[in-house]
Amino acid sequence: MIPFDYRRPGNPAEAVATVIDHEGAAFLGGGTNLVDHMKLGITEPRMLVDVSRLPLDRVTETAGGGLRIGATVRNSDLAAHPWVRRNCPVLSRALLAGASPQLRNTATVGGNLLQRTRCPYFQDLTTACNKREPGSGCAAIGGYNRDHAVLGASEHCIATHPSDMAVAMLVLDAAVVTLGPGGERTLPLAGFHRLPGDAPHRDTVLEHGELITAVELPQLPFARRSAYRKVRDRASYAFALVSVAAALELEGGTVREIRLAFGGLAHKPWRARLAEEALRGAPATEESFRHAADVELAAARPRDGNAFKVPMARNTLVSVLRGLVNGAERVRTDRTEEDR
Amino acid sequence: MTAGTRPLAIGAALPRVDGPEKVTGSARYAYEQPPPGHPYGEPVYVHPLQADIARGRVDAIDTERANAVEGVLAVLTHRSAARLADTGDRELAVLQSDRVAFRGQFIGAVLADTPETARHAAALVSVDYAQEPHDTELLADHPGLYAPEHVNPSFETDTDEGDVDKAMAAAMVKVDRTYTTPMEHNNPMEPHTTVAVWHTSDDEAPDDEASAGSVAGASPEAPVRLTLYASTQGAHSVRKTLAPMFGLVPDQLRVVSPHVGGGFGSKGMPHAHDVLAALCARAVPGRIVKLAVTRQQMFSLTGHRTPTIQRVRLGADVAGRLDAVAHEVVERTSTVKEFAEQTACGTRMMYAAPHRRTTHRLAALDVPVPSWMRAPGEAPGIFALEVAMDELAEAAGLDPIELRVRNDPSADPETGKPWSGRHLVRCLAEGARHFGWQHRNPAPGARREGDELVGLGVAASTYPYYAPQGSRARVRYDGEGHWNVAIGAADIGTGSRTVLTQIAADALECPAASVTVELGDTRLPMATVAGGSAGTAAWGATVVAAAHAFRAAHGERPQPGAEAHGGAEAHPDTKRFAVHSFGAQFAEVRVDADTGEIRVPRLLGVFSVGRIINPVTARSQFIGGMTMGLSMALHEHSVLDHRTGHVVNHDFAGYHIATHADALGIEAHWLDEDDPHTNPMGARGIGEIGIVGCPAAIVNAVHNATGLRVRDLPITPDKLLH
């Protein structure tokens, strides 16, 4: 760890200006990912601009019936928020499926969106990684890639995005509000994270010095019937092998409206629009769920170590939708966390 | 129980005597040493340099940029480090040559005034290598396989009786399968740490009289005493190994280790970091040097369990009675030091058959040095044997408990000696009752609850009784009814300080509250290592002997300050009897039919281990071992990237260990026993048996739940997807 400066600006505009004015400056939120990276030498910011105490810690209902979530709201607080639990259980469940209680108490909403891949090669300076060091190669290709991407990867990077929260927010049609050198802008979350292409060092479309100030959720009444299911190697503190976020609106036995997203499969939270399309107006049966999953996963390109993700993603999607239809949402995995 | 140990304190649920110190944070672990008030000034921090090739030579090390960093005191390399007097143990011959034998090996170290500076400067050192092709991949038919002279610690490599092949050909019911276990790492909570100081003659601490005499007249320029504050399972064994390497007589090296945050075998012998810390301290005499191995570094430097490839063959008659048992093991060692895990040794005594064979073959590869990890041998070996037994039960159409009952030998199949107490059948019967075994549906995949497939499994467990000799203890009467008992043993979190207090109290016929036990210092009498589940037996017998010696010398009304030393003789019966502990492990698993996720709502073990000294600490050992067995079954796997030779998942996010949320319901029971053939306490040992058999019970339960037989650990969800 090299010596660095530490600043604590009083408002978001000052935070943005401080980062823009200083080469090698980085925003510090909960620090649960950045500080690890500094210890490991993955990133060596010259200055940390601490935004964790900015007045961005409010959760407020919007005039349109949606929710505005300040960027520094802690993951555990958001998971426990009554509005979230009532109107979009998928988000509460996703948050509680993430990390460990200690980490959730520290991690912020903005930081969660910006956390970086847990690809072990990205985190190991002695190996090649285009995300860490553009042009150096990808050690995960041909290496240990059990946790890696099957959708949307490139020959330059097969990393996955590790967030659970973002997968849930994606099905809620969330938008990311930022403040940058050019002022405030609002981006759909669906366009926020990038696919790796030939520039895997860029995880998102944010510019240097652009600060997330809030996440907005529109009103989505049918998200009351929503679920998040994370499949993982152990019951807690493990990243998703596959996760599924879903919100479902039924009319009789037919799918009227649906939102679906996968986690653990791609360089970004993966909105399953092809599956959604296949299901809109279709009978809410196991057969159509399976068909929809297959449609979405037809583009999957597994590597040596992760072919299992394709059937696992299909089965999980079917299981989650079956659960939503039955009204008996499957919460076995997450319940142990929540009851703590 | 033999005379002189009234079981008053023994058997009582005495809370840990060092519990308050630990929960208030005042118990001093290695990194927090030495205590305030020492004369050594500000500490120096070490960050090691590690090879990032798996085989070759260091050609050049450029330390200029690192040396230029403010706060850096020195950069040690193989060129600048002091020469060791003995380099016979090549794991410990740190910085003595330019050879690199595995990735992650120490090739240097930075000494600086803060840990951050040392780490930063270490990243600025650039190294040129002459790289050579390496081989880290264990294969069943590896061309380099060889038979070691013996297997850990000194068992025969191979055994062969009768004609296994012929018996297998003739068997009515048979199993011939290969089982594998992966490379695993011990990962105690407290990473390995060594704080070292080479004393100059003017820094004598007031209590240093013990060794000061031997170096009287030494000049300040010639530091001749070394103190290591280490995180170790055996202060005396560290001293015995390291003193000659530094050209010291034992009195010149003191090892202090009062509290240790777990070891699981990885702290059972000194590793390279102990030597490196001492070498670094040698470069800055009179100063404290602190080396805390990082979690990532532990994956190359502090031992691990070898992967195993095990072929097990069982042949039986239609009634399930074994006619042939063969267990042939292929495993790995390093090129710098041989460690031959005794994987098939448990099979030699577990079940009888006229035709029997066990073999161990090793490949010495370019990997870090494997070593002891909780129940070396038994943990992987009994996994394979006990899954094979389940497969045999299925093939014979027998209940798996009944199969084991039918094959329970009346004497040790290997030596013919009578058992000191083989109560496996009782453990199985009691376990079956507690667990509700009668509710098991023997048809695989037949019990479904919602989306979950539910299965029950069983396996037997065993662990040998070791009683290492050579420990000594000192008993002193401090007056006013208070006793001090000193023994250079270790408490690595198991509760040995507590149980020795109980044993001493009964031997001295006084309340436990009147006894203070001192451990973890080579200033205290010699004690053997905390390993082989033997600590309580070996040290407890020693404490009893010392207490008897005290009474013989000082009678019932001693003067304050009176003391006596004692050591225990081996119990003569241990030569006449086959002394082993046994257990029965039961598991209920629930497998998600869609995702393959496995959860274990219930584990239950019943153990026969001789007398239990303290039910509280004993329970911790059993359920801790079973949790580690659960972890071995479902999670633990050090993934070696054979292109580079490094463990890819070298942290707690990547190397999965069971979390609280995985360890849902773990129950341990034990038989009320007293083994008269072991030691004055009638105890055998409990530290390791909890892990043994547990993975097999889980694998067998997964088979009962799903019909899928996973023979390669760990069982991850992808292996159950369909």
Image (cartoon, rainbow, N blue to C red):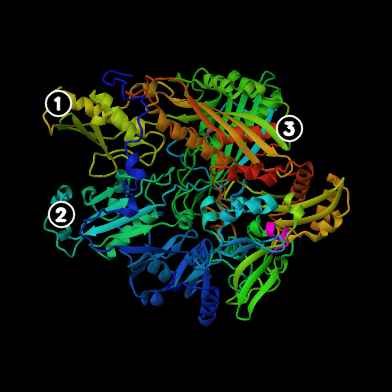
Q: Quick check: B313 above or below A184?
A: above
Query: Which numbered mark, 3 or 1, is in the foreground of this view?
Result: 3
Q: State whether residue B690 appears in this view.
A: yes
Name the mark on residue B448.
3
Task: Name the one closer to the observer, B273 or A212.
Answer: A212
Crowding near the residue tagged with mark 2, few <14, some 14–19, many ≥20 C-alpha atoms within 10 Å: some
Name the quarter where the N terminus of chain A is drawn.
bottom left
Label 2 belongs to which residue? B215
Name the quarter where the C terminus of chain A is drawn.
top right
Q: Quick check: B183 above or below B131?
A: above
Disc 3 residue type (three-letter): Arg
Q: Which residue is drawn at 61% across and 43% down?
A: B714
Q: What stretch is highlighted in magenta?
A: A167-174
Name the mark on residue B94.
none
Q: Quick check: B215 above or below B448?
A: below
Q: State whether residue B352 appears in this view.
A: no
Label 1 belongs to which residue? B553
